[in-house]
Image: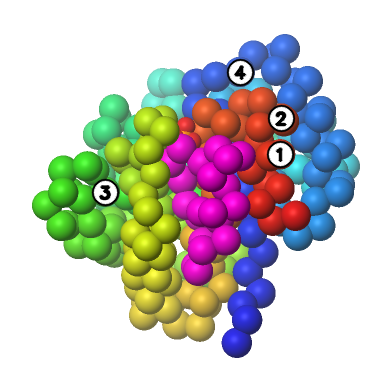
Amino acid sequence: MPTARRPLVAGNWKMNGLKSSADEIDRLVTAAGGLKRLDLMVCPPATLVADFAERARASKLLIGGQDCHPEPAGAFTGDIAAEMLADAGASAVIVGHSERRTYHGEDDATVRRKALAAWRARLTAIVCVGETEADREAGRTLDVVGRQLAGSLPDGATAANLVVAYEPVWAIGTGRTPTPADVIEVHGFIRNRLIGRFGPAGEGMRVLYGGSVKPGNARELLTLANVDGALVGGASLKADEFLGIAAAYA
Ligand code: PGA
């Protein structure tokens, strides 16, 4: 039975972008109207969420955050609540990106609390999982991803409030990607875990691939079984390149 999952191509700008980057957003706003078969999203740094959301308001371009704190408010200097992202016009937030897990020591329990915070603020949680190179070489990929899913995904996930992003840590920003067979294996495994835990809703949840997605490899990677879009870092910073990736679904 064909599934009705609508692809999502999301750009993670990481710590890049200034007010002058709005030109790229304006170009995506214009292009988004013509993209009938997929959702397009940009997750800029927090300083740009409100401005970009305003520019994208009447369009199909979605704006998301890159991280949120578990709590709705309080004495957490430098942090941003999911409610603040929603207030600024975001409709989603990435949680558990490997750079947060590595540089900020976030464990699965923390990521789970952040996903719950996203839902509390009515944001879609884009929960990232993925193995390190050492994990893959040791044959532990599915163990690691399975553990991250079990620990990071809260109960109550639906196809509307959850997106999973599979991002092998060793593929992020390196120009290296898994083989199609490896992507199919991990995405199939994630799909089975989602269905096993959430029932039929798991069939509708989008599972994105992330890690060195470029216009040149997008079609090959993004049309594989159980790949429902991409989470794109470096290649999302320029509208042309990002749209070249979205063209995989044209
Ligand atoms: P990359 O990053 O596309 O630059 O490899 C992906 C990500 O970290 O989401």
Q: Which residue is the site of mark 2?
A: 239
Residue at the extreme bottom:
1
Label pair 4/1, CB-CB below 8 angstroms: no
- Start and end of the magenta stretch? 208-228
Query: Which residue does the image show at 51% across and 33% down from the upper left?
Result: 233
Tag 2: Cα neighbours inside 10 Å, few (<14), some, or many (≥20)? some
Q: Which residue is the site of mark 4?
A: 17
Work out whether residue 169 can be spotted.
Answer: yes
Q: Answer with mark 4 or mark 2, whichever residue precedes in sequence.
A: 4
Q: Which residue is the site of mark 1?
A: 243
Residue type pointed to by label 1: Leu
Q: Position of residue 6 (x, y in %)?
A: 67, 64
Query: Which residue does the image show at 66% across and 32% down from the upper left?
Result: 241
Residue type pointed to by label 3: Glu
Q: Which residue is the site of mark 3?
A: 131
Q: Answer with mark 3 or mark 2, whichever residue precedes in sequence.
A: 3
